[in-house]
Image (spheres, grey):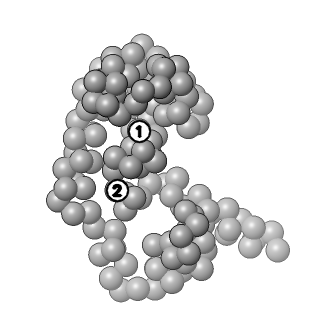
């Protein structure tokens, strides 16, 4: 959706995308990408033993061992948790895990989360102030 390659979606880019009748076609994931996303969800759910939708400090060590065994990280457990826990609440949400997988190149960038629209929201807030 972003066209200038800066890693954010500017308001104008979002508006241009929104005007397209086939706007959602460009967001469709291919079969391989869907399979990777499903695998990521299954792994996350396996370690989310209390089914809260997040991995707390008690659940994280087993998940960390899975990441190490899968060659997804070489960081220490504490540094890996800091890298995954973007909002610093001491838990890893599924969206944070997906974002981390995207940053590491494991998942394709077409996966859109609410955090992907932060640049648009900030731009809209700035425009309202003017």
Q: Which is more foreground, mark 2 or mark 1?
A: 2
Q: Which of the image's four quarters has the N terminus?
A: bottom left
Q: Residue furthest right?
A: 130
Whichever of callouts 2 and 1 sits on the residue coming sooner in the sequence is 1
Q: Name the residue rendered at 68%, 68% in the picture.
A: 123
- In the displayed structure, 64 sits above or below 73; it is above
- In the displayed structure, 105 sits above or below 91; it is below
Q: Name the residue rendered at 49%, 34% in the picture.
A: 84
Towards the viewer: 20 or 2: 2
Towards the viewer: 30 or 22: 30
Q: In terms of image quadrants, where is residue 23? A: bottom left
Q: Position of residue 5 (x, y in %)?
A: 53, 70
Q: Name the residue rendered at 17%, 59% in the picture.
A: 31
Q: Name the residue rendered at 44%, 35% in the picture.
A: 93
Find the distance from the CA under tag 2 to the CA under tag 1: 13 Å
The answer to whether 116 appears left or right of 55 in the picture is: right
Q: Position of residue 76 (x, y in %)?
A: 48, 20
Question: Of the numbered discs in the image, which one, if any, rests on residue 108?
Answer: 2
Q: Is residue 51 among what the camera can see? A: no
């Amino acid at each position: 959706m972003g066209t200038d390659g800066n890693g954010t979606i500017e308001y104008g880019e979002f508006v241009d995308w929104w005007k397209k009748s086939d706007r959602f076609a460009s967001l469709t994931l291919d079969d391989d990408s869907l399979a990777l996303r499903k695998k990521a969800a299954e792994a996350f759910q396996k370690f989310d033993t209390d089914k809260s939708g997040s991995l707390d400090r008690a659940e994280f060590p087993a998940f960390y061992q899975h990441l190490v065994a899968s060659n997804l990280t070489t960081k220490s457990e504490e540094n890996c948790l800091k890298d995954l826990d973007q909002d610093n609440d001491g838990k890893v949400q599924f969206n944070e895990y997906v974002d981390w997988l995207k940053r590491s190149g494991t998942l394709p960038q077409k996966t859109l989360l609410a955090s992907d629209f932060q640049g648009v929201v900030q731009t809209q807030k700035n425009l309202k102030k003017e």
